């Protein structure tokens, strides 16, 4: 439904409005009927009540006459009945005037009825009631004859009044009934009008819908040039507009379809050409897929070989990793040994220093000894000199003794003795000198040896330092080697991991390659199918 | 003592040896009472053994000395003394066999080299540290010697005349040669030789 349609123009609003109006009218009618019926009922009650008044009038007349027929107890009873009835009659006027709910009497509203009631009351008060009161005081019929006759006339007039009132009320009731009937007729007429309107609207809708449907059928049959009749501005009008728009669009579409068909023909030509080339291409693809299949087969075997090789490499790398770990461990131990070696070398250097000092002190001692030996040699020289001089003295003494002849004999013995002693001491000094010479030689060689020893110690210190340096270098090298071995171990581990990953990857590749082979076969099959389809397409296009 | 020892030193033994040596040195400085007594006893015995044998007439008291490779002897009664030659002064204008002069307790003494005097060829090394001073009443001159050997007795019959090969100037100064090749010089002849006499007047013909 087009949105610009005003709401009060819609079919919905129209139909709904009619229905709502009908409903409201019905409601008003029902309420009016209820009211009128109530009024009618009140009227009926009032008429009834008035009828009862007439009966009261007669009752009073009867009781007034009866008053003189009975005596004593009975008369008192009658009197009280009469008074009771009088009282009730008096109450009736107020009830008539202002209504009584218990009796269903509405208060009097009509002016004629009200004046009639007032006249009646007036009659009652001024004539009927005073006569009646006088009668009730009287005791003999004789005395009451006049009054009783007067009472009968007054009563006649009163009852006539009541009848008049009843007539009035009946007239009013009749009027009301007439009103009620009129309302019923009016409502019936209204209903007929509304139904007529509904029929009219429905008819219009149906006619227009039929027209639209006929138009649609004709459009469906191909009369696209037709345009639907559009009247008014409701939904059907919108529908008609939509129909017209639709047909216009359809016309346009058909035109475009024509153009498209031309294009499709061109396309089909192109497809034919393409089918030809597809046929050729599929042949080539077939050849290619065959090659690919054999290639994939080779790839499968190559991949399997690679997997085997990778397994071997994996084993090797694991072994390498283990060995590298072992090398790392042993090189670490070697590094420890190198450290202790360095400590030993340092200790050796210290000890060598001590040895050197000791050797030097030995050399100094030996030199001191040699110097002491020198002193001994000097002493020995002195002793030797003394011995020589003694020898000479002995010689000279012997010479003197021999020159003295016989007298010098004893002296010559002493001289010989002295000479022997001096020679002995000379010999001893010679021995001492020899020993000193030996000591000198020994000290010389000892000094030389200690010098050599010092030199040896120096060179040993040098060598030990070199050894320490070598060990340090070696330790460093070993540490580097240990680090390198650790790195190698780590690398080997990584290599092993990498190899296992390669192994997994090769397995995947193998799987993929086999899938590839399958795919190639499928491709081959597809190419064959494609070739067949191309052939079929060609024959189809040719026909 | 070898400079290199293959065997390690046994320090215990070395200490023992040092102790022994120390003891020996200390012991050598002072004689034990036994040793002293033994020495004295031996000396006494030696003295007691000396017989009072009369010197035979045929024996000569000689002083023997060595010069170069020869041994010589001179009669003791012609030897004044034997002195050490410590220093000497060569004297110019003296014969070749005069080595020089030296002072013996203030007395100027001429030094004669017998090798040059006898014309014996000089060969080998010598000490030349002794001077055998010849003279009877007083010192005449000193004969250069390597070593004074001592005073000894020499039997006359042991002496042989000098060999004939010894000729020339030296023969008249030789009295004989023993079997031990000890040459007995004629000291008196040497002392009496004018050539060997240093005259104060300076009659030097050579």
Image: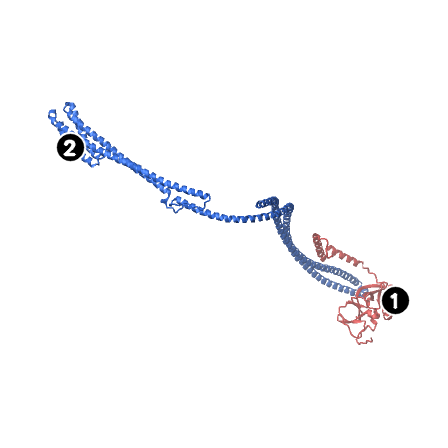
Chain colours: A blue, B red
- Quadrant assignment, res B65: bottom right
- Quadrant assignment, res A65: top left
Label 1, residues with CA under 10 Å away: few <14, some 14-19, many ≥20: few
Q: Nearer the viewer, residue A6 or A492?
A: A6
Residue drawn at 53 percent across, 48 percent down: A264
- Residue sitting farthest toward the right: B164
Q: Position of residue A252 (x, y in %)?
A: 47, 48
Query: At numbered mark 2, what does the secondary structure look like: helix, strand or loop?
Result: helix
Position of residue B36 relative to residue A115, above or below, is below
> Which residue is identified by label 2?
A123
Label 2, residues with CA under 10 Å away: few <14, some 14-19, many ≥20: some
User: With B82 as the anchor, is A229 left or right in this view?
Assistant: left
> Which residue is identified by label 1?
B163
Residue A407 numbered tag: none
Position of residue A49 relative to residue B125, above or below, is above
Q: Position of residue A442 (x, y in %)?
A: 72, 59
Circles 1 and 2, Cβ within 8 Å, touching? The answer is: no
Query: At numbered mark 1, what does the secondary structure look like: helix, strand or loop?
Result: loop
Residue drawn at 39 percent across, 42 percent down: A208
User: With B19 as the anchor, is A222 left or right in this view?
Assistant: left
Chain for disc number 1: B
Q: Position of residue A71 (x, y in %)?
A: 14, 23
Which quadrant of the rendered structure holds the N terminus of chain A? top left
Front of the two marks 1 and 2: 2
User: With B150 as the anchor, is A75 left or right in this view?
Assistant: left
Chain for disc number 2: A
Can residue A218 be seen?
yes
Q: Position of residue B171 (x, y in %)?
A: 86, 69
Can residue A140 be seen?
no
Q: Nearer the viewer, residue A360 or B41?
A: A360
Kindly report the distance in space between the C-alpha atoms of the residues bearing marks 1 and 2.
252 Å
Q: Nearer the viewer, residue A47 or B206?
A: A47
């Amino acid at each position: 439904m087009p949105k610009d349609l005003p709401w009060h123009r819609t079919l919905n609003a129209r139909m709904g409005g009619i229905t709502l109006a009908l409903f409201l009218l019905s409601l008003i009618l029902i309420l009016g009927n209820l009211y009128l019926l109530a009024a009618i009922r009140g009227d009926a009650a009032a008429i009834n009540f008035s009828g009862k008044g007439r009966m009261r009038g007669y009752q009073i007349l009867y009781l007034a006459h009866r008053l003189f027929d009975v005596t004593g107890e009975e008369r008192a009873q009658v009197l009280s009945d009469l008074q009771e009835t009088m009282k009730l009659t008096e109450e009736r006027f107020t009830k008539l005037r202002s209504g009584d709910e218990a009796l269903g009497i509405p208060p009097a509203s009509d002016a004629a009825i009200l004046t009639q009631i007032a006249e009646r009351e007036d009659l009652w008060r001024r004539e009927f009631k005073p006569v009646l009161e006088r009668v009730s005081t009287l005791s003999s019929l004789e005395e009451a004859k006049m009054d009783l006759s007067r009472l009968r006339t007054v009563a006649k007039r009163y009852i006539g009044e009541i009848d008049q009132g009843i007539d009035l009320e009946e007239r009013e009731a009749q009027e009301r009934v007439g009103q009620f009937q009129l309302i019923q007729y009016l409502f019936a007429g209204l209903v007929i009008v509304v139904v007529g309107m509904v029929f009219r609207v429905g008819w219009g809708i149906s006619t227009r819908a039929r027209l639209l449907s006929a138009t649609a059928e004709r459009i469906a049959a191909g009369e696209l040039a037709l345009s639907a009749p559009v009247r008014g501005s409701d939904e059907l009008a919108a529908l008609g507009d939509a129909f017209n728009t639709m047909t216009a669009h359809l016309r346009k579409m058909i035109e475009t379809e024509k153009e498209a068909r031309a294009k499709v023909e061109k396309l089909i030509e192109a497809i034919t050409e393409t089918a030809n080339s597809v046929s050729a291409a599929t042949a080539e693809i077939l050849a290619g897929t065959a090659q690919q299949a054999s290639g994939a087969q080779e790839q499968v075997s190559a991949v399997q070989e690679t997997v085997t090789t990778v397994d071997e490499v994996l084993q090797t790398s694991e072994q390498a990793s283990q060995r590298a770990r072992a090398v790392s461990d042993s090189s670490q131990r070697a590094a420890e040994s190198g450290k202790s070696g360095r400590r030993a070398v340092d200790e050796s250097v210290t000890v060598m220093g001590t040895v050197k000092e000791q050797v030097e002190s030995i050399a100094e001692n030996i030199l001191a000894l040699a110097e002491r030996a020198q002193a001994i040699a000097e002493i020995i020289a002195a002793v030797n000199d003394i011995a020589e001089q003694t020898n000479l003295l002995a010689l000279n003494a012997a010479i003197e003794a021999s020159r003295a002849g016989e007298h010098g004999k004893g002296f010559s013995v002493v001289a010989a003795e002295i000479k022997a002693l001096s020679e002995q001491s000379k010999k001893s000094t010679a021995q001492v000198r020899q020993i000193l010479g030996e000591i000198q030689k020994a000290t010389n060689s000892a000094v030389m040896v200690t010098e050599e020893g010092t030199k040896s110690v120096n060179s040993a210190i040098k060598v030990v330092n070199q050894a320490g340096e070598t060990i340090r270098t070696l330790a460093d090298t070993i540490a580097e080697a240990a680090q390198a071995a650790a790195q190698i171990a780590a690398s080997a581990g990584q290599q092993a991991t990498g190899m296992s990953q390669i192994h997994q990857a090769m397995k995947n590749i193998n799987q993929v390659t086999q899938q590839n082979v399958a795919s190639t076969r499928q491709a081959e099959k597809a190419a064959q199918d494609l070739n067949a389809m191309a052939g079929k397409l060609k024959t189809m296009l040719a026909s | 003592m070898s400079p290199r020892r293959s065997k390690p030193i046994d320090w215990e033994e070395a200490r023992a040896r040092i102790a022994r040596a120390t003891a020996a040195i200390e012991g050598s400085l002072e004689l034990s009472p036994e040793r002293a007594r033994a020495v004295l006893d031996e000396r006494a015995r030696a003295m007691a053994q000396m017989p009072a044998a009369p010197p035979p007439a045929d024996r000569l008291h000689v002083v023997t000395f060595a010069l170069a490779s020869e041994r010589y002897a001179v009669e003791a009664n012609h030897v004044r003394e034997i002195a050490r030659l410590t220093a000497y002064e060569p004297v110019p204008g003296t014969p070749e066999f005069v080595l020089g002069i030296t002072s013996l307790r203030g007395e100027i003494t001429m030094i004669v080299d017998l090798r040059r005097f006898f014309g014996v060829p000089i060969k080998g090394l010598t000490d030349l540290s002794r001077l055998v001073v010849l003279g009877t009443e007083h010192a005449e001159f000193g004969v250069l010697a390597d070593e004074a050997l001592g005073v000894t007795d020499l039997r006359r019959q042991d002496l042989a005349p000098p060999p004939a090969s010894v000729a020339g100037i030296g023969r008249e100064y030789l009295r004989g040669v023993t079997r031990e090749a000890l040459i007995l010089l004629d000291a008196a002849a040497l002392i009496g030789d004018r050539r060997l006499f240093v005259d104060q007047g300076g009659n030097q013909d050579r």
